[in-house]
Image: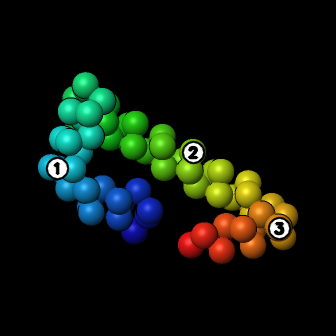
Amino acid sequence: MTLNDELFAALGDSGLQQIAGLLGTDIAQAHTAVEAAVGTIVGGMAHRTGDAQGAQALTATA
């Protein structure tokens, strides 16, 4: 199971409906937006761990 799969399972339909409402869009677009946001966040975390100081800072906030 991927991170996205786990996230969408935890959100459920009601969570996606809430996000869609906040974004003023439909569930399909909300789903796409959440996937993009997760990709951006994970990419930023991966970039941050590119050096020892960044990796240490990331684990210190977890």
> Furthest-left residue in view?
14
Residue 30 location (% of width, % of height):
31, 36
Q: How many marks?
A: 3
Which amino acid type is marked by label 1? Answer: Asp
Residue pointed to by mark 3? 53
Q: Is residue 39 left or right of residue 4?
A: right
Is residue 28 visible in this depiction of the protein?
Answer: no
Residue at 82 percent across and 67 percent down: it is 53
Q: For mark 3, give the secondary structure.
A: helix
Is residue 9 visible in this depiction of the protein?
Answer: yes
Q: Earlier in the sequence, mark 3 or mark 1?
A: 1
Which amino acid type is marked by label 2? Answer: Thr
Residue 37 location (% of width, % of height):
48, 43
Mark 3 or 2, which is nearer the eye?
A: 3
Label ID, residue 13: 1
Which amino acid type is marked by label 3? Answer: Gln
Q: For mark 1, give the secondary structure.
A: helix
Mark 3 or 1, which is nearer the eye?
A: 3
